[in-house]
Image (cartoon, rainbow, N blue to C red):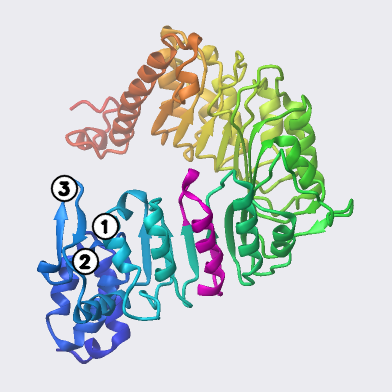
């Protein structure tokens, strides 16, 4: 054996490469049995990441457990575990660094097996080297096991348990996490609607001083003030309660600085006005900002909200802006005046806005806005609800848009396809090409069947790398009565687009003399390319 294979770091790199490929388990298990030098390193890599707890059960003597079920297997113990069997289990458990158990995989053990694992013959953590835990088992019998899994080395905790599963006992277990793993830097809790749950989560957050990433539901003002003072904080996602809003006693009219290292901020509330009220009191220099709301109680709330962003957010640092309104409001129509305040953010790369109300933008409006975002790669306006109006943005306008935003790869807006009603013998848009656009969703755009071929011809020439053309695909748009046959017609455009794209590629290859059987004719000067 080569001397390099005796070096542990070299083996870790090799075995890590094997692990990252599919079906790595048998190969790593075989390497662990090859020689003593390989055993420990291979076992460490093999057990480093688990998706459920069943492998720990299956490593025990076969007379100590059995499995039930055909498609989805559930494991259970047939008797209490002996000290030697606990030693085997703990020997493998100490190698586990990441345990990711979504709800489906968490139920690979029955409740009795869970109960047995809660009481190992030791006072130490069952997984002493566990660094990341992602837990989704909502069974009440499983909550005490979380207490046994966590340890002083745990830095990531994600609990994905929703609904009425959080009783007083479960909340008490949550409170103990602060002592079990004091050095957590990543915390994810579900956005529950129970007030006492909000307080328990808030108290827990105040106990951790090294947090980098936090995602949770409603938190109280004390927790928000604590998080504001953490210079380690990089990502923060939380909710505002519209019924019992934050009192903002410490948030005066003066701007409040958030941590300088904060890069991602996401806020959710029932009413956009509530989020705007908080945003007006903050001074934010994040690169990504996301907002989710149910309604906007003020008719000019959207414009006021975007104006608040202009006044309180750093203009050069914001790269990604997301706004998601969940309920359709047809009483207000958004116009270019609503979007104009966003023009100050010159470095935006992603704009994903779902207002929940109709939109009216002309081609000139869209081009004026796009002039402010030269680095834009993704623009989405009302992906779920559509524009609910007849768009006046023509395909030619789209071509000018991609000239202003040369890096645009995904576009979701409504258009008016009537601007292209015949297949032109000349190059559209003066031969301008946009090679970056790969996906176009025209939302609730209407279309006439006679436009199928002209549009496919236009798109295939102007957007040579356009791989996906979609329309009327969200659940809300699919249920609209005016959908008619529009979605089927757009699907035909997408089909024809593929044909046109293949023909154009064939023509390019012929012209370059690379097509099979055509190169010689082109080389001999035959402009037709026919032998």
The residue drawn where x is 37% and y is 20% is: 491
Establish if 527 lies above or below 62.
above
Mark closest to the chain's N terminus, 2 or 3: 2
**Is residue 81 rendered to the left or right of residue 300?**
left
Q: Quadrant of residue 274?
A: top right
Q: Quadrant of residue 390?
A: top right
Of residues 73 and 15, the one nearer the viewer is 73
- Badge 1, how many Cα within 10 Å: few under 14, some, many 20+? many
Q: Are marks 3 and 1 in contact (CB under 8 Å)?
A: no
Residue highlighted by disc 3: 69
Residue highlighted by disc 2: 57
- Image quarter in which the N terminus is found: bottom left
Q: Count the numbered circles shown.
A: 3
Residue 185 inside the magenta-drawn segment: yes
Of residues 360 and 496, the one nearer the viewer is 360
Give the residues drawn in magenta, as a range.
Answer: 159-186
């Amino acid at each position: 054996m080569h001397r390099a294979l005796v070096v542990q770091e070299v083996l870790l790199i090799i075995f890590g490469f094997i692990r990252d490929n599919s079906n790595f388990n048998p190969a790593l298990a075989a390497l662990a049995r090859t020689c003593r030098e390989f055993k420990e390193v291979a076992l460490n890599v093999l057990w480093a990441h688990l998706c459920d707890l069943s492998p720990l059960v299956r490593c025990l003597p076969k007379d100590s457990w059995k499995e039930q079920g055909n498609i989805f297997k559930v494991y259970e113990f047939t008797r209490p575990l002996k000290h030697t069997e606990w030693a085997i289990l703990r020997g493998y458990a100490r190698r586990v660094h990441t345990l990711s158990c979504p709800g489906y995989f968490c139920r690979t053990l029955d409740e009795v097996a869970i109960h047995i694992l809660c009481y190992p013959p030791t006072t130490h953590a069952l997984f002493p080297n566990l660094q990341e835990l992602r837990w989704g088992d909502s069974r009440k019998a499983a909550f005490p096991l979380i207490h046994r899994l966590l340890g002083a080395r745990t830095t990531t905790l994600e609990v994905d348990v929703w609904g009425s599963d959080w009783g007083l006992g479960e909340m008490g277990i949550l409170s103990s996490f602060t002592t079990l793993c004091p050095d957590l830097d990543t915390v994810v809790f579900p956005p529950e609607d129970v007030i006492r749950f909000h307080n328990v989560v808030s108290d827990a957050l105040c106990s951790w001083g090294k947090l980098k990433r936090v995602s949770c539901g409603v938190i109280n003002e004390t927790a928000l003030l604590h998080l504001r003072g953490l210079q380690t904080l990089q990502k923060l996602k939380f909710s505002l309660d519209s019924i019992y809003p934050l009192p903002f006693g410490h948030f005066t009219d003066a701007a409040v600085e958030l941590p300088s290292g904060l890069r991602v901020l996401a806020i959710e509330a029932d009413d956009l006005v509530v989020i705007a009220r908080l945003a007006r009191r903050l001074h934010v220099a994040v690169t990504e900002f996301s907002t989710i709301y149910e309604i906007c109680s003020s008719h000019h709330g959207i414009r006021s909200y975007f104006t608040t962003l202009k006044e309180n957010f750093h203009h050069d640092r914001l790269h990604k802006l997301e706004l998601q309104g969940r309920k359709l409001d047809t009483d207000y129509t958004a116009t270019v005046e609503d979007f104009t305040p966003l023009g100050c953010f010159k470095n935006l790369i992603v704009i994903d806005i779902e207002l929940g109300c109709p939109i009216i933008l002309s081609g000139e409006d869209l081009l004026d806005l796009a002039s402010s975002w030269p680095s834009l790669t993704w623009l989405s306006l009302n992906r779920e609800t559509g524009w609910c109006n007849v768009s006046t943005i023509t395909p030619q306008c789209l071509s000018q848009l991609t000239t202003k935003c040369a890096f645009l790869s995904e576009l979701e807006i409504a258009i008016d396809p009537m601007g292209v009603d015949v297949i032109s013998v000349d190059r559209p848009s003066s031969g301008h090409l946009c090679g970056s656009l790969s996906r176009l969703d025209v939302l609730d755009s209407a279309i006439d069947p006679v436009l199928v071929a002209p549009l496919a011809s236009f798109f295939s020439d102007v957007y040579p790398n356009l791989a996906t053309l979609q329309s009327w695909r969200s659940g809300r748009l699919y249920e609209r009565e005016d959908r008619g046959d529009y979605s089927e017609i757009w699907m035909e455009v997408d089909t024809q687009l593929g044909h046109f794209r293949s023909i154009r590629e064939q023509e390019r290859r012929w012209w370059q003399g690379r097509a099979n059987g055509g190169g010689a004719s082109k080389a001999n000067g035959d402009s037709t390319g026919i032998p």
